Amino acid sequence: MRYDKPNTEGSLVQYASRYDNLIGGEWVPPASGQYFENISPVNGRAFCEVARSSADDVEKALDAAHAAKVAWGKTPAAERANALLKIADAMEANLERLAVSETWDNGKPVRETLAADLPLAIDHFRYFAGCLRAEEGSMAELDEHTVAYHIKEPLGVVAQIIPWNFPLLMAAWKLAPALAAGNAVVLKPAEQTPATIMLWAELASEILPPGVLNVVQGFGVEAGKPLAQSARVSKVAFTGETTTGRLIMQYASENIVPVTLELGGKSPNVFFEDVMAKDDAFRQKALEGFAMFALNQGEVCTCPSRALVQSSIYDDFMELATARTRAIEPGDPLDTNTRIGAQASNDQLEKILSYIDIGKKEGAKLCLGGERVKLPGDLEGGYYVMPTIFEGDNKMRVFQEEIFGPVVSVAKFDGFDDAIATANDTLYGLGAGVWTRDTHTAFRAGRAIEAGRVWTNCYHLYPAHAAFGGYKRSGIGRENHKMMLEHYQQTKNLLVSYDPNPMGFF
Amino acid sequence: MSARVEATEAAVQLVRELAREHGPLMFHQSGGCCDGSAPMCYPAGELRIGARDVLLGEIEGCPFYIGGEQWERWKHTRLVLDVVPGRGAGFSLEAPRGVRFLIRSELCEPSGA
């Protein structure tokens, strides 16, 4: 089926003509009175206006967050967890509407938003509601008369800067643990994808007390930067790239606050020769695992954009893998049969094309795709790219930098040691894939690859309760796991003596 | 060392406009996801340049840096700063103008390293 375009009669999604900031439970116009046009990458046309905020708006949001933080932090865990569960329920009741909106805002196929983005985001709130209910501090008896209590306390007010590739899901990854842990949040969505989060905030603001959740829209340099620089936040969480990651650490160092950074990768997807040993379901699964580079148009921090294939199976495997990939053709993202949609923005499209250009210049062999696609009719102005396969050498730039598009670079390896050396020959260490029928190889490879997440005989699963985060230059901290509560908490130690006698020092 | 980065005429014009609005500028080449691989343009001194950053050249008098480890993997290429319509993310100064700096690349001649 095909969903109606938002803002047309019969569509599930009717956007307001403009969106203000959510501050202290109210919809507050930006101090400057300025708005920016929000463009759908599906057709390249603007569909709503969004607040172009500045430092003044960030300050207002911080005022509201600070006014709300004490009461929220003292709200019983059962009540906070209940609020998260209600948010999940509200999202579930609006799943199709939010999914269609996310497709329109980001360009990804509705097939994915319906089956992945929304269900994962909903589950994330439920997961952290559960974690919160089950969380305990600790107590240690140091001696007969002395005990050390460790009590979790919220940080207070935290800043969260969200990327544009999974706008709602990445917001959920950051918001759910922060809110569960009792913090008030000032959230800055990505300027490419600000819309769905506003539909979501309309739901969430009915559930959360005013000021607990504040959303400030705008450009990075005008709104994100003053938020990251503020001495009034106790933590900054950011997903993006390395230079901005460095800046955020630099700002945080000025305020001596912690950061969580997820800065991407160049994830290897390693296929050992035994995947081809039988023509069975597992071989099909492995081939699907290869094609996963096209998921979300390749705009995934863990895109399996380096496929490493054992030389003994290389030709046979690549013939099947290329055929599998050829079947993935860009189409209308609102059609539930479409498996690859639009790149999120024109500049992203241009960047992908520039990498295809450098790949060719470096001498990589273009095996498939390699060009922009102009779809007919209303979609003509959208940003579509054919899934692209390069063969080459791991030293090439198309093997070394995340293109963030549907482009995979494939190289051969000989034996286990060569596979691991090539897999680890990267600055990054976020994700990796290992495919083998041999359990020894599976575990040895998974442990030897320097990455925070090694999908073993699977890829692109993002369930709550499986920690996600990077080694090396891919960032600091983890997401997606109950340990994230601690990322958003202080530890209060009460060191208590019930010995009535003096210590005897003075 | 010869400059390893240059700029298209459109990029030069934009750098001049940004310099008029913001004063002296600097560039740092990003890596990683999202807007990774995009050059970031900041007021001069905004990003603390570290011991391993490499100065690739200047665009209209504005220094252009890249992380040393990244340069090790990029140094067979020559970078060309260009500009395209778009919005980007991150804190780069040009984004509110509806344009985004972009890096195009040429292969270095073997003798030109």
Image (cartoon, coloured by chain):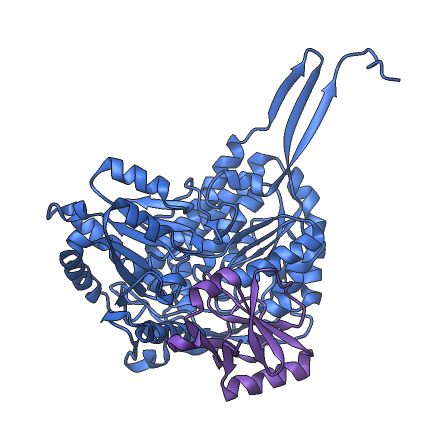
Residue A360 picture quarter: bottom left
Chain B tint in image:
purple
Q: Which residue is found at the position 11% from the left and 45% from the top?
A: A278
x%, y% of residue A485? Answer: 55, 40
Frontmost residue, A159 versus B32: B32
Q: Is residue A194 above or below residue A292?
A: below
Q: Residue at x 53, y 83 (%)?
A: B11
Q: Is residue A482 left or right of residue A147?
A: left
Residue B89, given in percent of the width and then of the height, sits at 52, 68
| Residue B82, x across and y down, in percent | 48, 81
Whether residue A336 appears in this view of the structure is yes
> Residue A36 is drawn in which quadrant?
bottom right
Q: Colour of chain A?
A: blue
In the image as oriented, which residue stretches furthest toward the left?
A: A279
Q: Nearer the viewer, residue A212 or B56?
A: B56
- Which quadrant of the figure contains the N terminus of chain A? bottom left
As drawn, the residue found furthest toward the right would be: A506
